[in-house]
Image (cartoon, coloured by chain):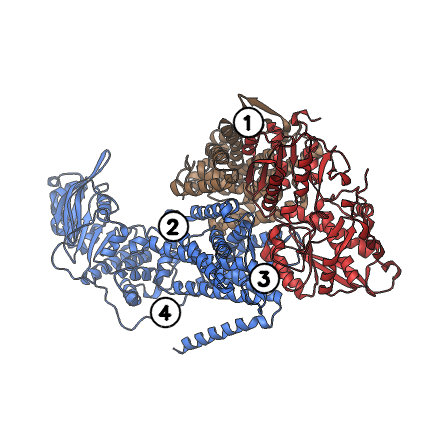
Chain colours: A brown, B blue, C red
Amino acid sequence: MLQALADGLLQGAVLSLAAAGFSLVFGVMHVLNLTHGVTVLLGAYLALLLWRILGIDPLLTIPLVAALLFALGYAYQRLLIQIAIRRASLMSTLIVTLGIALALRNVLTLVFSPDVQAIRPSYAAEHISLGGIILDVPHLLAFAASLLLLGLLAVILDRTSLGRIIRATAQQPLAARLCAVDVEHVFGLTFGLAAAFAGASGVIVGMLFPFTPTTEGYWTLYAFVVVVLGGAGSPAGALLGGLLLGVVGSFTVRWIGPAFPNAMAFLVLVLMLLIRPNGLLGNAFGASR
Amino acid sequence: MRGRAIAIAAIVAGIALLLALPSVLSPFQVRVLQNLFFAAALATAWNIMGGFAGYWSFGHAGFLGVGAFAAALLQEHLDLGSPAAALVAGIALGAALAAILAALLAYPVLRLRGAYFAIAMLGVSLVLSELASNLDILEGGVGISLIAVGPEWMAPEVFYYGVFLLLLAVSLAVATTIRTGKLHYGLAAIREDEDTAPMLGVPTLRYKTIVFVLSAGITGAIGAAYAFSLGYITADSGFRADVGLDIVVYCLLGGIGTLAGPLLGAAMMIFLTQVVLGNLLQVHLLVTGILITTIVLLLPNGILGAFARRNRRSIPAPVVAATLSPPIGHGDAPVLMLDNITVQFRGLRALSEVSLAVPPGKIYSIIGPNGAGKSTLFNVVTAYLRPTEGVVRYRGERIDGMSTLHLSRSGIARAFQIARPFQGMSVLDNIMVGALFGRSGPRDARAVTEAALRITGLTDLRDQPASSLPIGHLRRLELARVIAARPDLILADEPCAGLNATETLDVERILGDLRARGMTIVLVEHDMATIMRISDHVCVISAGSKICEGTPDQVVRDPRVIEAYLGTPASKLVSASLTTAVD
Amino acid sequence: MTSMTRRDFTRSAAAGTALIAAGSRARAQTAKTVTLGGSIPFSGSQANTGLNVYEGYKVVVKYVNEKLGGFKVGNELCKLDLQMIDDASDPQRAVTLIQKQIDEGVNFFLGSFSSAIVLPTVAVTERARKPMVQAGGGSDQIFTHGYRYSFGIYPRASRQLNSFVAMLKGMKPQVQTISIAVTNDPYGLPLAAGATEALKEAGIKLLETYKLPPTVNDVSGVLSEIRASTPDVLLAITHEDISTLFVQQMVSTGTDVKVLYMPLGPEIEQFRKTLGKYSNQLLTLIYWEPRVKYSDPIFGNAQAYYEWYKANSSRVWSNQSVAASCCIVCYVTAMQKAGSLDPTKVRDALAALDFTTMYGRVKWTPEGDGDPVLMGPTVGQVQNGAPEIVYPPDAATSKLIYPMSKWAERT
């Protein structure tokens, strides 16, 4: 039972990190970014490249991957999403992000082949035993990295001027405009930040789970569940939602059967939407629609 | 009538053509058309909820799968004698189960809006898909084979061409029936502004449930036929999540909310992916993705959506003029009575023991300085707020705590200070909603609408989209919509706020006209000149209490009123100059 | 190394060698094009295996057309034209586009990968009376419809693990308990069902069957239970990506078993590359191995095929690619035997085939799947990073390492 809890928490931390970017975009801009999963995978593939060609340990590649994806995310928002929101409704923007996700998935398949990939640094096989519970090193490192990165995101949002401006614009876009804030630029920064964290999580995902371009859908879906569970816009919400999801998954395996963690996750999604659609911590930026 | 005959002849000819088509086409082309009918039928069924009501479900794949598995499991466990029976029973069961599922989901899920609803439905379909994969009794993991049900002498693609064509016809028939009826206006109101709709008498939950169940049932039927057409179904191929999203794309591309839009969108995409790009290896996702993105960006309303806006032809006005008088006659008893109303918000006493009685067929104005509690009083009367103590009676019946819908059915209408027209609809259609869901029957609705247009002077603007109107016209539209419901009692919340002198006089004229027709009007207003000109009775509220009541002249001279407004005792003012200022 | 004649019934295989094409002598003759149609999942979850299958088809077509200059059917010189469409793992799409090929006059079809696609497409080709030879769908349900034009290289799924159970029965020290982990899909479930039956007959106790959903990210729960119940053998019937995850997590949680058998995974080079030393001693399904010594009517022998494959393909060989190549070898042989390109005559010739190819012996059951004894898989084990055949003894290239050493002790 304790093992199940431990497994769930370890798994959950990764889910939290992988959902943080999605949560930010949804909380600030109310956009459901279906390209999120592909962004995570982009991070994984980038780390794979760096590891294969230059032999760099994946954890060390996180800053570079994050920086690259920040730029990509910013460009994506300014060049595409911005236009979509202006011309079409928010729901149509969702479809645009879906189209891009499909296209990028195909590109990844063409470039990297559909083969199953995994990043396995030398410590990937270790584990420690703590009072009868087995904790494997990759998951432990991932847990630590996730907490660190989520903490970093929280600090960015709370303490830096970038964070302040994002929060202000999220709560009152019109007022922000009136204060001479370039709202589109801020949204671009938000998207970039989200993409950076998605990419960072992708590095960790690549270390833990074998991946192909097709697995991107899975990461977008689970990001949904995490956001609905924990609340949008805040790293704390993502952490809570992710940990909860991980634990629900591992307890489902323990008590209902190994075939049902996904079914349970989606059931929790639906129930949560019916009971408390804003998540346990609510939307971090005030009233949502 | 000739137009009608021609239309029927065209439809019959079209059907005959469609039925004869397979004989001249290659089997591949027949199959492409079969897939087209499948996609178009699904898209049309989705559209009655997504397009008409504005509730986008991302989980219709769930209903598709329910239908598919219902049919597959039925024919596996029950021998129904003939293949035809298996097909018919499968389709019926698939439709029924999907519809029942929708009915069960309706109350909880339809409370969600926008993206939340979409994702909740996606979640539902994913849960079902996972259960089908992993629950042994559903056999979705190992897959279920279905018996062949077409007649031996007919090529299967021709048979299913017919089956899906039939399902498309059913889907279109349902969509058309809804589109040309009262239900459509209600759905449009829900789509445009779901909070205002019940105030006009639209039964929102009932209507949403109706289209939800219909949409689900048709999709379930299609799912059953789909399973038979493939001959083998697994959880993956039955609950096609990609199809669930595809149908949204079809509607978006073609024109959401139109009848032909889903057909057009489905046709485009099917031809594209199966005919044009059929031989493309390895890049068809890339091409599809870019295409979807480009089209949604270039044509945000879809192809037909761009046309629909422009070509709003109006129906000619009926010859017989309608009466806008309230249907129920009334005697002299007060229409509205407030008995000792007290409203306490934690620390603040907003209203203290206010009592008033509104006589029938008069204009009753409520005035008072800012913060006096007028809005609170108004909210109590319209049942937005429950009083802490006291009773509100309308025609002798208690109405405090009544639902918005029930109130509007009883004949109370509220005109808002911040106008909330249905932006995407024309002036005429806005008023039609009021007329259809008010106290006239659907037959009189058109005539009543024309009358409302005339009274408010909006006849020439009937085809304009509401979003293009300036504030003065918006107020008049608001009133027109309210009038069209033929209420007994109109509650108007600062109808002249923000209007210039001419516009104000327009509104006053309309209110006077309504009074002449027998309606009772309760008004909250700041503009003293207006109050003096049109009110029969005035009630003054200050600091939560009624301080005075009477005719305009009586009230204006009352020293308590003067003190409340000006802050100084009347004795310190020259009363003569006050009365002249008011004249 | 013992010779590779599978089950040693090769007497009738002599017929194969005589049919090498005479086309190299007929330079100036214009060739008739024989189109091979069908679909492959180039995208979707089966895309990686789909590409393997495609490679298998391509190399044979290239050899026949370029190296041999074509093949003779009766007096006509023929060349092959491979026309595979992308079905994107969508059965509706596959069925529609294959119909198009039928309309355009394609007479011979190769199969896609995954039973969910193969079944509906076979129904279409059957009705049109065109043969389909496939190396992609093993689900029993493909072979219980009474189709006459459908031929599958693999035996049906419920029989594919018979050799493994037979091996377990004979192992010393005796194997007592086994647990099965299986993905809920049309491939895994029949395999598991068949194995369960065979295990019961062999008297080996099945402790638990863990069913997994098709997408899974974490098997630590299952592994905890396995650590607690300590089965001697773990049979994990999962696709390559989940097999990789399984081993990864077994290693990192220190979950050890004496025998680990994974029908899909260890035989793929990418899997072995990813897992390095941890892929050693894993058991798997092996249908083919580069060192086999079969003779072949087109290539001469398996070695020649292997050399050609290496030189002409960018992807490493796999079970599926070799089985796919075999499909075309069967077609060409059948066409030549029938002396005709009429689909029904070729179908009859296919059904009557009993010969050796570079893949091994080919002989079909009356229902159209591979004969379980003649075409069933051997048991392979990864040793020093490469697959070796360890059972049955007459086909073995190496001795079985049993029990498997602990993960922590790997070097």
Query: Looking at the picture, which amino acid does disc 1 mark?
Result: Ala
B572 or C154, which is in the foreground?
C154
Q: Residue at x 35, y 71 (%)?
A: B316
Residue B315: mark in rendering? 4
Residue type for callout 2: Leu
Q: Position of residue C37 (x, y in %)?
A: 69, 59
Q: Nearer the viewer, mark 2 or mark 4?
A: 2
Say which of marks 3 and 4 sits in front: 3
Q: Can residue B258 be seen in the rendering of this structure?
A: yes
To which chain does the residue with label 3 belong?
B
Instruction: Give the spatial CA distance, label 2 vs label 1.
Output: 44 Å
Determine which quarter of the picture holds residue B54.
Answer: bottom left
Q: Residue furthest top?
A: A131
Q: Gap between marks 1 and 3, in whole Å?
A: 51 Å
Residue where numbered disc 2 is placed? B104
Q: Label 1 belongs to which residue?
A: A144
Q: Secondary structure at mark 4?
A: loop
Circle 3 is placed at which residue position? B271
Helix or strand or loop: what does disc 1 sit on?
helix
What amino acid does circle 3 point to?
Phe
